[in-house]
Amino acid sequence: MNNNFRRCCQWLVAVSALASMTAALGQNPDAQIGREVAIPRHLQDGEEFNTPLSQLIQYGSQLFTAEFTIQEGAGRPLSKGTGAVLSDPSSPLVFPRNFDRVSSPDANACSGCHNVPVTGAGGDRVTEVFVLAQRFDRLTFDHTDPIGTRGAVDESGKLVTMESATDDRKTIGMNGAGFVEMLARQMTAELQTERDATPPGSSTPLTSKGISFGSLTHNADGTWNVSHVQGLAAPSLSSHGATPPSLIIRPLHQVGNVVSLRQFSNNAFNHHHGMQAEERFGLNADPDGDGFTNELTVADLTAVSLFQATLPVPGRVIPNDPAVEQANRLGEAVFNQIGCATCHATLPLTANHNPGLPGQPGWIYFEPSPYNPAVGPNSPNLQLGPANYPISAPALTVDLTSEMLPLPRLRAHHGLVMVPAYTDLKLHDIS
């Protein structure tokens, strides 16, 4: 009798649970059985300006850790990791060609690689990125494949090897990247000021924050000679006729390819996940042919850029051991004495200059960067200006020294924030 009663109770509980679930589904017409998306609702353009900063950064964190699925636009059947159309659109990147560890897409989430010791930081060697491999549709090393940059042949028609097709790079941390980008912005503005003060028929040394970038010559006919400029990427030295070189410092990615965290994020979402941002790939457009448009909004890119810019700043951890402390002090002294700190430098952000945000100190980070490239490779990217989604938007600011942000933080002292990034932000030929 007791067993029958127990079974009856279990049956009633099961029926009750089923009825409750059915009622809940009936009250929520948006619920979809089998729908698996990482971000059920994306931040819409304009909402970023009405969202509290802490919530905006938290939403950026959610985007960074989101494991995107094909039900929300992950994957790029007809696009390369560079954003270009496939060399062979007749062989789209669909299963089983939709995921490739080398030529990508190669990850579900940004945090799949950037996770050691915390989300947004570096990664284990196994999470390295294979830079340049994304220019191929899908690397196969199939010697019977004659189509350039499809799977085995490079731009010159040569068969590639693992060594010639890609440069593998360890995943590095984004911690402190907001301060680094603001350094690059200030230094870019200083170099451009020196450029603009150079009359035709003269040369001027290019220096910023004690770092020499060689010299720039303004020819008598109005053209520019950049042959003696040092440490800047080729796109920043491009000049046509009287149009001067931009001299933009590109602090991110391999060989100075990336100007800003926003450009980095635009690139990476497409490269690694096949998630295409509307500002890069067009409003209501579907160039990758997966059936989804506006996979990432302008507001999304602002949020994820702010998340990375405001990550805790890394520092030195010295054990509480007098002998180790002394060894550290001696090592730092030798580091400086033999000239290492000339390039591996600590540089100052000043209070009197913020390009694109007049009157604000240099540690007020804002989106979008005034130096975001609008044209050329890895473009367009959101421009600073009146709201014209997805082309431009006004500045959205955050004080990188604020104690309201994740700790630890760099602090301002006597009008300066010293940034111990151990770099001069120059490109160095060490071959």
Image: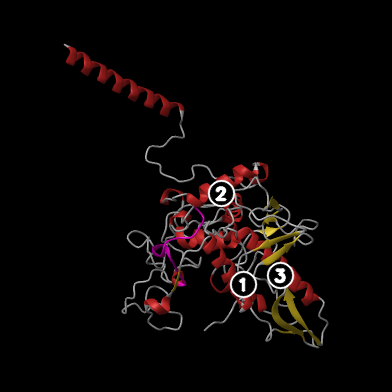
Residue 334 in the image, given as x and y percentages of width and height: 59, 75
229 in the magenta segment: no
Q: Which residue is mark 2?
A: 60
What residue type is disc 1 on?
Ala
Residue 300 percent location from the top left of the image: 57, 50
Quickly name the residue at label 3.
188
Q: Is residue 96 above or below residue 210?
A: above
Please state which of residues 234 and 333 is positioned toward the viewer in this rendering. Answer: 333
Label 3 neighbourhood size at 10 Å, few (<14), some (14-19), many (20+)?
Answer: some
- Mark in the foreground, 2 or 1: 1
> Quick one: which residue is furthest to the front in this view?
322
In x, y percent, where is residue 202?
81, 86
Q: Residue at x 75, y 70 (%)?
A: 190
Q: Which residues are magenta?
A: 119-132
Residue 164: x and y in percent read 42, 79
Q: Indicate how the structure is coloured in the image.
A: secondary structure
Taking the image as drawn, is residue 175 in sight?
Answer: yes
Between 300 and 304, the one nearer to me in the picture: 304
Q: Which residue type does callout 2 highlight?
A: Gly
Q: Nearer the viewer, mark 3 or mark 1?
A: 1
Q: Specify which label sits upstream in the sequence, 2 or 3.
A: 2
Q: Which residue is mark 1?
A: 333
Secondary element at image label 1: helix
Of the image marks 3 and 1, the number of the one nearer the N terminus:
3
Label 2, label 1: how far apart the Cα atoms are: 40 Å
Amino acid type at mark 3: Thr
Q: Quadrant of the N terminus?
A: top left
Q: Secondary structure at mark 2?
A: helix
* Residue drawn at x 74%, y 83% as measured from the top left: 216
